[in-house]
Image (cartoon, rainbow, N blue to C red):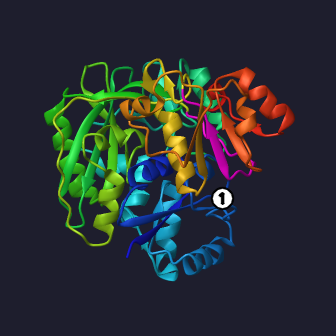
Amino acid sequence: MKKRILVFPCGSEIGLEIHQSMQHSTHFDLIGASSVDDHGRFVYEDYIGGVPMHTDVSFTVALKEIIRTRQIDAIYPTMDAVAETLHNLATKLGVIVIGSSKETTVICADKRKTYTALHGHIPLARSYSSLDEVEQYPVFLKPTIGYGARGAAKANNRRHAELLLETAGNQDLLIQECLTGMEWTIDCFSDRHGKLRFHGVRSRNRVSNGISVNTTECDRHAQEFAQWADTINNIFKPRGAWFFQAKQAVDGQPRLLEIAARLAGSSALFRIKGVNFALLSCFDAFGQDVEILVNDFNVELDRALCNRYKLDIEYTHVYVDLDDCLIVNGKVNYELVAFLYKAIDEGKHICLITRHRGNLKETLNKYRLTQIFDEIVHVTDGRPKSAFIIAEKAVFIDDSFAESKPIATYKNYNILGLYQIF
């Protein structure tokens, strides 16, 4: 039987990467859950919204009910603070919490604790206990607990630094030398036996909101980063996917920035090469030994916002055009084909309605589109396509406004123009 994994919160960058990594697994079913409705509800087919915040007093009761009713086998936390909460509740919940131990999670989430544990083992950025120790500006101030550069800022002079400290309130800020060189993420995987099974170095070429949106493999300081990975693995004993980040100092050498006891969103770079961190972590969590095969090719990952839509329309039939719609500029519109196959999975009736002037059968064979349709209507007598559309609940997909207008006007159907949705 498939193991049922609750991903919480599922709409974070990590939750979305877990979905990308495991959505087609034959071993695990994913159930997404969030306290605040976000992109997760567009991505996870099995989605639970309105879960109390992990800091709420009602969280435990609500989560236990989800575990009971949805027969959850394990929870995959996607945020450090959530992971700590779940570890504290693990006995009460009676399910596996995927990832590192509570102790490792807590230390990695706190940069001050991280630096203390690694002092003398790995090169760290110089830290100052107060502004009186600062000899040269700029300096960098960042929260001891946090991620994605949230709350972090560069102070160009003492007055600027004082203002940042004043506005921080009760938040504990680290004061460090300002590192301005290259930045790297080293994605790692350690198994339940404590063995470091993989580490891969990638450069953070373009960063947006603390997320590496363009990243490539990098061999600079490869030997040094390999030693760091071994050292961190031996001291912190992480389990499953984890990563650390480094940045170049003025002397040209890297300094450790942080460690996280979870996978990184842009670790998808290595997933493409065969290292599926989320899937490996789940197998390991259930006591299965894993083997990693890495493909030998170069990859560049570039990330951008993507759109997902939820429509409040009911339909049983899809009518779709061929020329300049399913076939555009001599190529199959694979995004439209993907939509049609999704509709097939949902039990929709798929009808091709076309004025194709060539040999329709030969064209469909040429583009390997013969098996998609439940019905094919080849209009050759000049009648409008609207004359052939008889279903009560249908959508019509066509690139032609002239064809779409009468269907929308007189039949009151929903028209999904080609350039509206693809």
Labels in figure, total: 1
Residue that sits furthest to the left in the current view: 223
Q: Horizontal placement of 420 versus 15: left or right?
A: right
Q: Horizontal placement of 355 versus 334: left or right?
A: right
Kindly indicate the quadrant of the structure image that contains residue 186.
top left
Q: Is residue 121 visible?
A: no
**Which residue lies at the image location 71% right of the left edge and 39% below the top edge?**
388
User: What's under tag 1, amino acid-wise?
Assistant: Ser
The C terminus lies in which quarter of the figure? top right
Q: As rendered, which of 253 and 15 lies closer to the eye?
A: 15
Q: Is residue 308 magenta?
A: yes
Horizontal and vertical percent for residue 207?
46, 27
**396 up-or-down from 195: above or below:** above
Q: Horizontal placement of 309 versus 247: left or right?
A: right
Horizontal and vertical percent for residue 29?
45, 65
Residue marked by disc 1 = 35
**Which residue lies at the image location 18% right of the left edge and 29% below the top edge?**
221
Q: Main secondary structure of the magenta part?
A: loop
**255 up-or-down from 16: above or below:** above
Q: As rendered, which of 414 and 156 lies closer to the eye?
A: 414
**21 up-or-down from 376: above or below:** below
Horizontal and vertical percent for residue 174?
48, 38
Q: Is residue 118 magenta?
A: no
**Segment colored magenta:** 306-322
Q: Name the secondary structure under disc 1.
A: loop
